[in-house]
Image: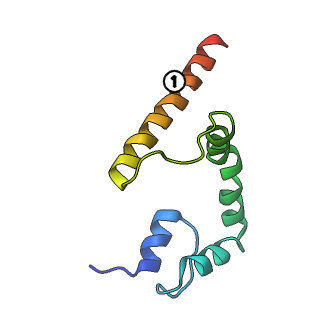
């Protein structure tokens, strides 16, 4: 059984995508943002993911990696995420 990229994207994301599977990601996102559901899904980023990165950058002052190489950067990012999660757990414990 064979599926097109557009069919698989529709199955995963649950929104309509461009009919052409060869469309670039920017065109697909523009098309998705034209629908009500697509705009609503994109608006959720403001309250779920984006604030965490803002806090990591501003409060924790993590602006750049100190190591080179994808493996080492991955390890450093895991340490940053661990520090954020510990900070969050302590805040929740005190509340």
* Residue 13 vertical position relative to residue 58 in the rendered view, above or below: below
Q: What residue is shown with label 1?
A: 86
Front-lying residue, 30 or 81:
81
- Is residue 28 rendered to the left or right of residue 9? right
Lateral position of residue 83 relative to residue 48, left or right: left
**How is this picture coloured?**
rainbow
Which residue is pictured at 42% across the width and 72% down the height?
A: 8
Callout 1 secondary element: helix
Given residues 42 and 56, the one toward you in this image is 56
Name above or below for residue 86 compared with residue 49: above
On the picture, is 14 further left or further right than 75?
right
Residue depicted at 54% across the width and 65% down the height: 14
Q: Check the image and name the residue furthest to the top.
A: 94
- Residues 20 and 90: in front is 90
Q: Position of residue 28 (x, y in %)?
A: 59, 77
The quarter in which the N terminus is drawn is bottom left
Q: Quadrant of residue 58?
A: top right
Number of marks drawn = 1
- Quadrant where the C terminus is found in the figure: top right
Considering depth in this image, is 73 or 7 the residue closer to the camera? Answer: 73
Q: Position of residue 68 (x, y in %)?
A: 40, 52
Q: What residue is rendered at 68% in x and 34% in y?
A: 59
For the view shown, which residue lies furthest in the left direction? Answer: 1
Q: Residues within 10 Å of mark 1 (few under 14, many from 20)?
A: few
The residue at 63%/19% (across/down) is 91
């Amino acid at each position: 059984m064979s599926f097109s990229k557009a069919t698989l994207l529709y199955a995963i994301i649950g929104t309509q995508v461009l009919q052409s599977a060869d469309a670039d990601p920017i065109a697909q996102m523009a098309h998705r943002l034209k629908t009500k559901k697509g705009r609503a899904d994109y608006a959720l980023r403001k309250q779920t993911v984006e604030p965490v990165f803002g806090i990591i950058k501003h409060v924790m002052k993590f602006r750049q990696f100190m190591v080179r190489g994808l493996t080492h950067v991955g390890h450093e990012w895991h340490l940053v995420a661990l520090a954020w999660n510990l900070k969050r757990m302590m805040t929740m414990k005190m509340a």
